[in-house]
Amino acid sequence: MRIDVLTIFPDYLAPLELSLPGKARAKGLLDLHVHDLRHWTTDKHHTTDDTPYGGGAGMVMKPEPWGAAFDELDIDGATVVFTTPSGAPFTQEMARELAGRERIVFACGRYEGIDQRVIDHARTRADVREISIGDYVLNGGEVAALAITEAVVRLIPGFMGNPESLAEESHEDGLLEYPVFTKPASWRDLDVPPVLLSGDHGKIAAWRHDQALRRTAERRPDLLHASQAISAGDLDDLDVRPATRGDAGEILTLQRACWMQEAQANPGVEIPALGESLDVVRASLDDWVMHVVRHRGRLVAACRGRLEGDVWDIGRLMVAPDLQGRGLGRWLLSYAESLASTQATSYSLFTGAGSVENLKMYKKAGYRLRGEQPGIPGAVLLTKRRIF
Ligand SMILES: C[S@@+](CC[C@H](N)C(=O)[O-])C[C@H]1O[C@@H](n2cnc3c(N)ncnc32)[C@H](O)[C@@H]1O
């Protein structure tokens, strides 16, 4: 990647020699050039500003030096970033996008900003981005160019020794990062959370996800879509109740979304839940004990059961696809078991033979594989003894 920075204070960009950008340059991943805009002025005072048309306080950066600099630096086809408090807020997503560019030219404003025609002209030659690094006003665009460069450069493919460390950072998955700890395990009477010393990677991942959610909800609720705030730890917020006919439409929608995944995991297998009509779903509510789970009004999960002899037959365990992997499925399974009538001595359910994640969860919950589910090729039956 090549980066050019245009500024009237080139010394301000000296830190680009250090730390990450410095390393990227040493590795040959970054070709960086800082230019003094005054080089493209024509008067003996190297003037880059003038009074604003229409009057008002302050000075405005003149267009001519910018135009000459753009011509000499040949900005055609590049991405030109104008740093400005009235630009789009800089985000990690933007950093990722810019990290894929071959050439970025930063135009650092000063005074009251740059003559608008400079930006309009650049737009005819390059991909122009007007970017703000926050809702406050700096004296010049250099600090913004430094911040954007640092965020972008660390994402250039091949730059980070361990790319996994990038994946878990704040903002990468829309959440803030969980708290991190290092040795010693105990310091000034403050202990590292025991789960991190447990060696149980599943538990550690669940704890970290939960912490990231909590931290985001507390500090940056604006980042969190309401539905994302659900995890098995937030079950108090869930509204669980018997399904009514009025729920049928949403159940059908959730059912199709969930079993579409099953169809992908079990190619060629005919899946009854996927083909049912609204009338069938509605009628099934008379034959089954079905419960629905809502979070702030949204239908996020459901399950049903009915007694077959002395077996509590569990079915239609579904969690909205965007909320899976947070422990809701495991909780829902034990909830479905709790609905069993007193005569039931065991539970049964079936799933696709290729539904690896479901099978893992059922086995973990004590279910044993009993072979093919009669009448549904490609599906397998699982059962579990009821413990009173
Ligand atoms: C004093 S500011 C000009 C502010 C301008 N009069 C306004 O109200 O939008 C001078 C320069 O600093 C830079 N700058 C200031 N705040 C910034 C921010 N939050 N993000 C990016 N650049 C900023 C821009 O390059 C801007 O042209």
Image: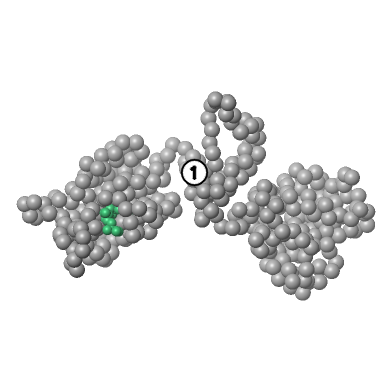
Find residue 118 and report its image quarter: bottom left
Find residue 323 and report its image quarter: bottom right
- Quadrant (top left, top right, bottom left, bottom right) of the C terminus: top right
**Colour scheme in the image?**
one colour
Q: Which residue is situated farthest in the front direction here?
A: 57
Percent across and percent down for residue 312 are: 87, 55
Amino acid on which disc 1 is placed: Glu
Relative to 331, 132 lies left or right: left
Find residue 32 and report its image quarter: top left
Percent across and percent down for residue 320 are: 66, 59
Quadrant for ligand 1 reads bottom left
Q: Residue at x 61, y 45 (%)?
A: 210
In-front residue for pair 202/56 = 56
Relative to 198, 362 lies left or right: right
Q: Which residue is situated farthest in the left direction here?
A: 44
Q: Which residue is situated farthest in the bottom direction here?
A: 279
Q: Residue at x 88, y 44 (%)?
A: 387
Q: Residue at x 24, y 45 (%)?
A: 33
Percent across and percent down for residue 51 are: 16, 61
Q: Which residue is mark 1?
A: 169
* SS under mark 1: loop
Query: Are there few (<14), some (14-19), or many (20+) residues within 10 Å of tag 1?
Result: some
In-front residue for pair 156/231 = 231
Relative to 204, 222 lies left or right: left
Relative to 41, 130 lies left or right: right
Q: Is residue 211 positioned above or below 355 on the image?
A: above
